[in-house]
């Protein structure tokens, strides 16, 4: 599936394509989504480029992701998908600039593409080119990553509050509550690592575009926009690193709380064992039915033995309380 966008007065409209052999020459943006072989060939004929395969897009070498071939600039970046779900993922997207036309190749649906498509459908600059569409897409991708990091930071603040300032019965600790917190921390850590991966790839892409800007007739405003994007990516990458460190701290703190809870449980069992030891000793003595045990003939021997066991249990307990061991 693919979409072809052509300028229409002050907007960018999606053209209805019924014949792959007759793609409009005025197209400034062609968006390939899980393209077929026939669609690849049709776009290659129109734009004069070679559309990379999905395997090519998965390459991690910089030389395979950012390069120039036949005057066309190939740029592959890692973008976020499904960040609002419990299973966020990343996907490789290739941006190809050739003859002021942009071709994007993707196999997933990152939200920035929908946002930019809707935005340009409402209004776009006169004489819009593929370079301008690329700037819009990169700006939307950076904004999207910033939103994800902001939400993750807010969620981590809530998790921190749950760990260090639990309310009511939560102060006593529950295995289910602890497991939920650990799962939440793990998910935020996974999300943050994916965002950071995306930011690193976007930063390399922006640097590549800025380095190649001398060969393109771009306006001063677009050059400034590239510099702003570079600064934004650097600041967001630093924030993602800070958030990763905070997540590690939260994980260590949560594990520390779990260890303290376990120690309290073990301490309780240890104290109960010591408290019950003297009564057990008394009961064991009077359970030995020897003939020469004078207490066996006492009329009140049984209640006295029970009382002795109670006192033997209460004595250690009160001592522990006085020492503040409980």
Image: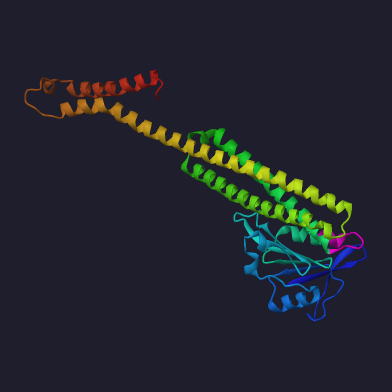
Q: Relative to 84, is 139 on the left or the right?
A: right
Q: Nearer the viewer, residue 238 or 249?
A: 238
Q: Which quadrant of the rendered structure holds the C terminus?
A: top left
Kindly indicate the quadrant of the structure image that contains residue 317: top left
- Magenta stretch containing residue 120, yes or no? yes
Residue at the image point whose x is 82% and y is 74% from the top: 16
Give residue 68's position: percent from left, percent from top.
74, 65
**What are the residue bounds of the magenta stretch?**
118-129
Q: Is residue 294 placed above or below 82 in the rendered structure? A: above
Q: Nearer the viewer, residue 28 or 100?
A: 100
Kindly indicate the quadrant of the structure image that contains residue 102: bottom right
- Magenta stretch containing residue 315, yes or no? no
Residue at the image point whose x is 65% and y is 65% from the top: 57
Colouring style:
rainbow
> Do we see residue 173 in this rendering?
no
Q: Relative to 218, is 281 on the left or the right?
A: left
Give residue 6's position: percent from left, percent from top.
86, 69
Q: Which quadrant of the rendered structure holds the N terminus?
A: bottom right
Q: Nearer the viewer, residue 251 or 184?
A: 251
Q: Is residue 219 placed above or below 236 in the rendered structure? A: below
Give residue 206's position: percent from left, percent from top.
75, 54
Q: Relative to 152, is 222 on the left or the right?
A: right
Residue at the image point whose x is 35% and y is 19% from the top: 319
> Do we see residue 232 in this rendering?
yes
The total number of labels drawn is: 0
Q: Is residue 246 placed above or below 71 in the rendered structure? A: above
Give residue 97's position: percent from left, percent from top.
79, 65
Q: Nearer the viewer, residue 37 or 34?
A: 37
Which residue ends up furthest to the left in the rendered image? 291
């Amino acid at each position: 599936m693919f979409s072809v966008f052509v300028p229409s007065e002050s907007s960018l409209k999606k053209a209805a394509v019924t014949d792959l052999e007759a793609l409009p020459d005025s197209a400034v943006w062609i968006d390939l989504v899980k393209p077929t072989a026939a669609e690849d060939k049709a776009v290659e004929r129109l734009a004069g480029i070679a559309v990379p395969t999905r395997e090519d897009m998965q390459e991690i070498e910089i030389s395979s992701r950012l390069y120039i071939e036949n005057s066309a600039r190939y740029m592959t970046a890692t973008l976020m998908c499904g960040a609002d779900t419990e299973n966020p993922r990343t996907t490789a997207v290739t941006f190809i600039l050739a003859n002021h036309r942009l071709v994007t190749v993707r196999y997933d649906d990152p939200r920035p593409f929908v946002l930019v498509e809707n935005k340009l459908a409402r209004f776009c600059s006169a004489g819009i080119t593929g370079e301008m569409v690329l700037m819009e897409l990169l700006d939307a991708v950076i904004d999207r990553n910033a939103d994800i990091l902001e939400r993750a930071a807010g969620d981590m603040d809530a998790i921190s509050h749950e760990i260090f300032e639990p309310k009511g019965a939560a102060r006593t600790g529950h295995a289910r509550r602890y497991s939920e917190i650990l799962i939440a921390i793990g998910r935020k850590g996974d999300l943050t690592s994916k965002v950071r991966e995306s930011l690193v790839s976007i930063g390399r892409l922006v640097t590549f575009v800025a380095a190649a800007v001398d060969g393109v007739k771009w306006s001063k405003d677009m050059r400034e926009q590239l510099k702003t994007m570079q600064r934004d990516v650097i600041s967001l990458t630093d924030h993602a690193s800070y958030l990763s460190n905070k997540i590690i701290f939260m994980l260590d703190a949560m594990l520390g709380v779990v260890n303290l809870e376990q120690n309290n449980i073990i301490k309780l069992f240890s104290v109960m064992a010591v408290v019950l030891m003297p009564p057990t000793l008394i009961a064991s003595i009077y359970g030995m039915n020897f003939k020469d045990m004078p207490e066996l003939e006492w009329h009140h021997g049984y209640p006295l033995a029970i009382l002795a066991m109670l006192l033997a249990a209460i004595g250690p307990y009160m001592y522990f309380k006085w020492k503040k061991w409980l």
